[in-house]
Amino acid sequence: MKTITVKKGQILQRQGDRDTKVFVVRKGLLRCYSIDEKGKEHIFLFGPEGSGITDHLPPNAPADLFVDALEDSKVLVREKTLAFAKRNTPKVLNRMMALQQRVIMLMSSSIIERYEHFIATYPQVAERIPQKMIASYLGVTPEALSKAKSKYLQSK
């Protein structure tokens, strides 16, 4: 276990990497994402201060996800072990529950409902990232998000 300093834009994990780690954000902001065959990024989750980010696969399996820094950050790097998993079961279960809710929301909610959920889930992140990253997280284009937010604000 060690703390590292990472610069904005630095990649901590690439898709296909083996022996992946658990990254705990002490200061800064990370994101976890995939890139499809067309080169489009799909943001899976954000990791603000106090959050842990990991690819939830066994340590030696090739990673499905990229992890990079959206801001200069200080990150605690831990090995993935069974003991670590047992110690952190409540945190992992909470994260899995949040991800399950997100998947259901992506399948069944309007853009505005997804946006409101994003703001409630990541209140400290919304002002720190570009709208195109929020749109990627919500599974919509930046234009669709902008249009939906405009309609939403007009209806209030």
Image (spheres, rainbow, N blue to C red):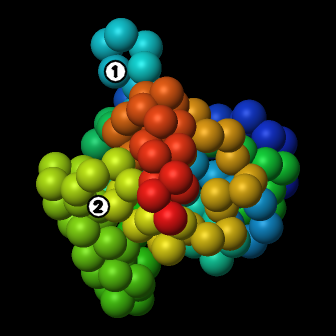
Q: How crowded is mark 1: few (under 14 residues within 10 Å), some or many (20 or more)?
A: few
Q: Residue at x 45, y 65 (%)?
A: 116
Task: Choose top left, top right, bottom left or bottom right for residue 4.
Answer: bottom right
Q: Mark 1 points at which residue?
A: 36
Cα–Cα gap, marks 2 and 1: 19 Å
Q: Residue at x 53, y 37 (%)?
A: 146
Q: Which residue is drawn at 52% across and 52% down?
A: 154
Q: Which of marks 2 and 1 is nearer the N terminus?
A: 1
Nearer the observer, 69 or 78: 69
Q: Nearer the viewer, mark 2 or mark 1?
A: 2
Task: Choose top left, top right, bottom left or bottom right for residue 144.
Answer: top left
Q: Position of residue 1 (x, y in %)?
A: 65, 69
Q: Given contact means CB atoms under 8 Å apart, are the residues at marks 2 and 1 in contact?
A: no
Residue 89, disc = none
Q: How crowded is mark 2: few (under 14 residues within 10 Å), some or many (20 or more)?
A: many
Secondary element under disc 2, as helix, strand or loop, is helix
Secondary element under disc 1, as helix, strand or loop, is loop
Q: Position of residue 29 (x, y in %)?
A: 70, 57
Q: Mark 2 points at which residue?
A: 102
